[in-house]
Image (tube, helix red, strand yellow):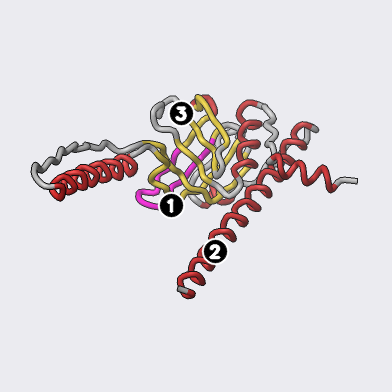
């Protein structure tokens, strides 16, 4: 019994450490995103970078195009569900109470099986693919690092809707209306602020969690 308690406490400690680490990383990203937004509000534009990684990959910018991010490591994901066929079975054995109990257990097992199949097929972010990301004043450029290593460009005019998710930037494109895509990155808030400014000259100011704002205000003299 003591061994199981020790193992349980160890697993809880690892889980708590992972949650704290993820929360700290998100707070750092939100803070960096806010600093970028505040500098944009002060009309301090982001400095262009030389597209050395893009040139090394055999691609070139268009005439007059400005590079803002050169070859950041990201993951691409798509939101969709899988088709599923559910089979509803009815079990009923006439006779003793034991037969009735077997019938109930059979129907419960069939229900559990269907529930697990539905949960597995439910829409979610799927098929993560490692890629490199370039951000310019005109588009996203993405180069897959697995499979056929294809190139994808997303021009600002093709983005119908965008939003900041907890671990990435979600895009709904005209040509992929029913398959939203996510660019998952270690700095989603910073990337979203940069994207909104580059694409529409809009300054998005990320909001820190309320508890963090409360602690910060109490710490200020």
Label 1 Cα crowd, 10 Å radius (few <14 / some 14-19 / many 20+): some
Q: How far across and how far down the image is residue 34, in percent?
A: 72, 39
Q: Of discs 2 and 1, which sits in the foreground?
A: 2
Left or right side of 28 for 56: left
Of 86 and 80, nearer the camera is 86
Region in magenta: 140-152
Tag shown at residue 39: none
Q: How far across and how far down the image is residue 45, in percent?
A: 74, 36
> Does the magenta portion include 53?
no
Circle 3 is placed at which residue position? 173
Circle 2 SS class: helix
| Residue in view at x 70 percent, y 45 percent | 32
Circle 2 is placed at which residue position? 14
Q: Of discs 1 and 3, which sits in the foreground?
A: 3
Left or right side of 125 for 82: left
Q: Above or below — where is 155 with respect to 105? A: above
Cα distance between the residues tagged 3 and 2: 39 Å
Left or right side of 212 for 131: left
Circle 1 is placed at which residue position? 145
């Amino acid at each position: 019994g003591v061994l199981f308690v020790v193992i349980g406490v160890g697993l809880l400690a690892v889980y708590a450490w992972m949650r704290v680490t993820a929360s700290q990383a998100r707070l750092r990203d939100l803070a960096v995103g806010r600093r970028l937004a505040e500098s944009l509000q002060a009309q301090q534009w982001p400095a262009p970078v030389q597209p050395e990684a893009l040139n090394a990959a055999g691609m070139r910018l268009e005439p007059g195009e400005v590079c803002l991010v050169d070859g950041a490591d990201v993951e691409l994901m798509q939101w969709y569900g899988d088709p599923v066929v559910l089979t509803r079975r009815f079990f009923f054995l006439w006779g003793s109470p034991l037969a009735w109990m077997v019938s109930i257990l059979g129907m419960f097992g069939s229900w559990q099986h269907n529930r697990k199949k539905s949960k597995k097929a439910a829409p979610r972010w799927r098929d993560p693919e490692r890629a490199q990301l370039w951000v310019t004043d005109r588009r996203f450029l993405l180069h897959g690092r697995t499979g056929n290593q294809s190139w994808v460009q997303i021009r600002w005019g093709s983005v119908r809707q965008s939003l900041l998710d907890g671990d990435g930037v979600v895009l709904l494109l005209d040509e992929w209306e029913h398959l939203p895509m996510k660019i998952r990155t270690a700095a989603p808030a910073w990337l979203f602020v940069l994207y909104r400014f580059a694409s529409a000259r809009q300054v998005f100011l990320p909001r820190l969690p309320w508890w963090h704002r409360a602690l910060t205000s109490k710490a200020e003299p």
